[in-house]
Amino acid sequence: MAIITYREALNQALREEMGRDDRVFLMGEEVGVYNGAYKVSKGLLDEFGEMRVVDTPITELGFAGVGVGAAMVGLRPVIEFMTWNFALLAIDQVVNAAAKMLYMSGGQYPMPMVFRGPNGAALQLSAQHSQAFESWLAHIPGLKVVTPGTPYDAKGLLKAAIRDDNPVIVLEGEMLYNTKGEVPEHDYIVPIGKAELKREGSDCSIITNGKMVLVAMNAADQLAKDGIRVDVVDLRTVRPMDVEAIVTSVQKTNRAVVLEEGWEIAGIGAQVVDYIQRECFDHLDAPVIRVHQADVPMPYAKGLEKLAKPDLQKTIAAVRKVMYLD
Amino acid sequence: MATKVFMEALSPTMEEGRLVTWLKQEGDAVKSGEVLAEVETDKAVMELTARGDGVLRKQVVAAGTTAAVGTLVGIIAAADEDIASLLGGVAPSGAASAAPAAASAPAAAAASAPAAPAPRAAAPAAPAAPVASAGRALVSPLARRLADESGVSLGAVQGSGPGGRIVKRDIEAALARGPVASTPSAPARAAAPVRTGEAFEDIPLTQIRKTIAKRLSESIGPIPTFYLTAEFDLSRVAEMRTAALALGEAFKVSFNDVILKAVATALTQHPDVNAHWLGDRIRRFGGVHLGMAVATDDGLIVPVIFDADQKGLREISAEAKTLAKKARERKLKPEEFTGSSFSVSNLGMMQIDQFTAIINPPEVGILAIGAIEEKVVVGPDGGFTVQPRLRVTMSCDHRAVDGAVGAAFLQTLRRLIENPLLLSF
């Protein structure tokens, strides 16, 4: 199997799906001539032409709305936001139009479209450009939200998202684009709504998604040196959430740490913990602990930013705590 | 980091304990798991073990003091650690008595709880670690379930989690110890009674005495008890014993052993009697866990022959002997004297013709066994025979057992005892 970057995996997904279905087109800022702000759409303009790869002005609300209209008349748009921080300007089209069109038209207008782009923090991009929005988006009935953490899942989930007849949010990561992993050359999808047990253990479950999957895998490696074996449950999709995978793991290990990139209040982890307390009450040996971003706007200062982010040390400390080791 | 030592619930019914002896003195180095002190619970003398490493800095209560479960009794900390805040309001060890010590525990706990972090916008501060206190055991949901499933009595388990929370590993450790693995500490005696020189003697109440009083007055009060007496012919049991003994010493069994076996067998046919009254429900037991009252120098205790219905006469005989011996030596562990589903009390060896026993709640019945006596009986043909006769009286909790139900049980018991051959089927 070829080892490629997350960026290339997304590029392959777009190319394959555009080749497979001529209703699929890509639209966003700098996606064409510039080959994408993060080069995800590299080469696509040359290959598919400017009817299929459309550069837009800096008008997030506008081009998101054009995407919704295109989906209403039968096309399958992929709308790229340069980051999800900028997508705040387009949130009315995402939440009020795309998410509700099928429902409010009495089933007349399916919404087979994708909104995608990098989500969460990179490095020193400060408060306005470092936000993880999965819990905002997952809150909305009518949307599906996927958060691939590996190149394999990035390709498989983006392809599944493009083929889905509902609006699907694909949350990528600037810090993930250069990460590498095995990706098959053949056609495959990763089903939306299915978590994956990325590491099998017995002592504690780390339930996570997106960028934090790598942190969790790192923590699992470190903890293994102390003889602590953890399950790493990568949710992959945060809406709809794979409750069964969570429950199976926690009922096995009796302890859980929920790791997420975003803030604490009403975060994705809060929902995970709710499923755990409901479904695993008699299986819990310790209160579930969440690891998340500090409850502050992301600081610009390097040291403060590090303190604010969920990371390896905080995750290890949380696992040791639920295991009553500290 | 300092570790507070609390009076722990070392037996299922323990509400307070008397610290018999400190085995570690102030200034001694201690390791987690080491025995700090011996504590007399309501039923036995148990070990109080350390839950942290360091130095025993303070004996908050003195030897001989009785303290409620959850009371701070000592502090383990680093040799140079400041423990003043943990001791806030605690009386000096020499003068400690149960009441002030109990009162000081929450204060000390509060003083030592970490200061809440600076308030964040709307995020709740992490709650301080729960503190073990009397009346409410801290148990993780998993540990509670495992204890239920495995029959481990939570009261007999010492929690190793924060604030003494009982967690999975504590249940596993309790199971690994098994019913007889660990060696109990040498029995300690209460201080010798003081003779005043007058014609009376004041004897302080021991914990076991207090428990008997409390439990049994609970029993005769709220439990509507009725009594059923029957007299059995023991001729065939006597014949069977003689015949068995002829096979060798290994087959020697007492009358009492045969009665225990017969009761266990009869209970399997009368699940209504082999039950607990739980206030809002009656719990019938799948197995027969037969409590047998044993008199000891300190008072009555009721060790349990678990799954007696599954055991043969020889097994029951051996187990009854072992349990009685351990009871007299005060070596019974809590799991060996809790969990009975029905009890038997025998005063026959003390020439009591018949008596009524007091139900040990939540059980719904107890069988009192009198002395075996040779009696002249009118036989079926009108002639007279001499038979060894035994009188038993069953006390029944009418809330769970009706007269006819109790009587039917005694009918079965009569059939088994008068035809002991049936016990081998």
Image (cartoon, rainbow, N blue to C red):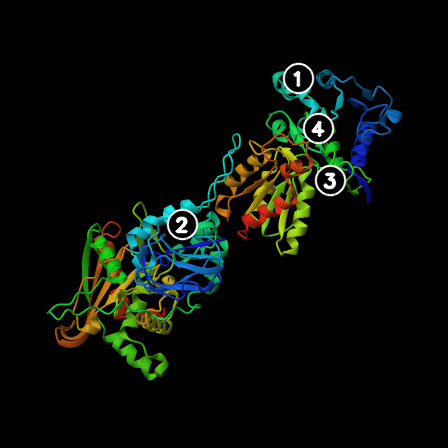
Q: Quadrant of the N terminus of chain A?
A: top right
Counting from the top left corner in percent of width and height, residue A195 is at 65, 40
Q: Nearer the viewer, residue A152 or A21?
A: A152
Task: Give the foreground label among 2 and 1.
Answer: 2
The residue to which callout 3 is attached is A150
For badge 2, the amino acid type reads: Ala
* Same chain? Circles 4 and 3: yes
The residue to which callout 4 is attached is A164
The residue to which callout 2 is attached is B132
Whether the residues at callouts 1 and 3 have beta carbons within 8 Å, the answer is: no
Q: Quadrant of residue B10?
A: bottom left
Judge whether A29 appears above or below A9 on screen: above
Q: Residues within 10 Å of mark 1 (few under 14, many from 20)?
A: few
Counting from the top left corner in percent of width and height, residue A182 is at 78, 44
* Distance from the alpha carbon under mark 4 to that under mark 3: 20 Å
Residue lying at the far left of the rendered structure: B199
* Distance from the alpha carbon under mark 2 to that under mark 1: 61 Å
* Distance from the alpha carbon under mark 4 to that under mark 1: 16 Å
Q: Which mark is residue A108?
A: 1
* Same chain? Circles 4 and 2: no
Q: Nearer the viewer, residue A281 or B88?
A: B88
